[in-house]
Amino acid sequence: MTVSTISPNHIGTRLRDERQRQQLSLRELAYFAGCSHGTLQRAEAGTVDMAPALKARVARALRVPLAELWPLDAPSPPGEAGSGKTSGSALGEVADADGQLTQ
């Protein structure tokens, strides 16, 4: 599986399009997602990358799957490429999508 890079501007456009489709203001979405409207404004402009937990809250507030807004951040089913786990230390630890180390 080849993973392509998606530009922050493209992600921001997807986020803005979905927010506007649902007729939400930046402030309304920020309220529902529990963040500042400035953070969302910068994310829509492509100048900031939000933390994974905030991305999940924004997707939940918009009632869309995380992969619809941030396709590379959504966890894949276990055993598939891009499963949301990254290599850790030489001890074989990995960090899951939430950043928790597991063996």
Image: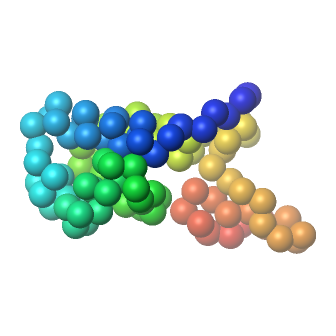
In terms of depth relative to the viewer, which is nearer, 61 or 35?
Answer: 35
| Residue projecting furthest to the right | 90
Figure quadrant of residue 3? top right
Vertical comparison of 27 with 10: above or below: below
Residue 75 at x, y percent in the picture: 56, 44
Does residue 1 appear to the left or right of 64 in the view shown?
A: right
Left or right placement of residue 25 versus residue 94 in this view: left
Q: Say which of 19 and 33 sits in front.
A: 19
The residue at 58%/56% (across/down) is 97
Query: Residue, x 12% and y 57% (percent of image)?
Result: 27
Indicate left or right for 70 with 54 as reference.
Answer: right
Q: On the picture, is 12 further left or further right than 22? A: right
Q: Which residue is painted at 68% across and 54% down in the image?
A: 85
Tag count in the figure? Answer: 0
At 23% across and 63% down in the image, what residue appears? 38
Q: Position of residue 76 (x, y in %)?
A: 60, 39
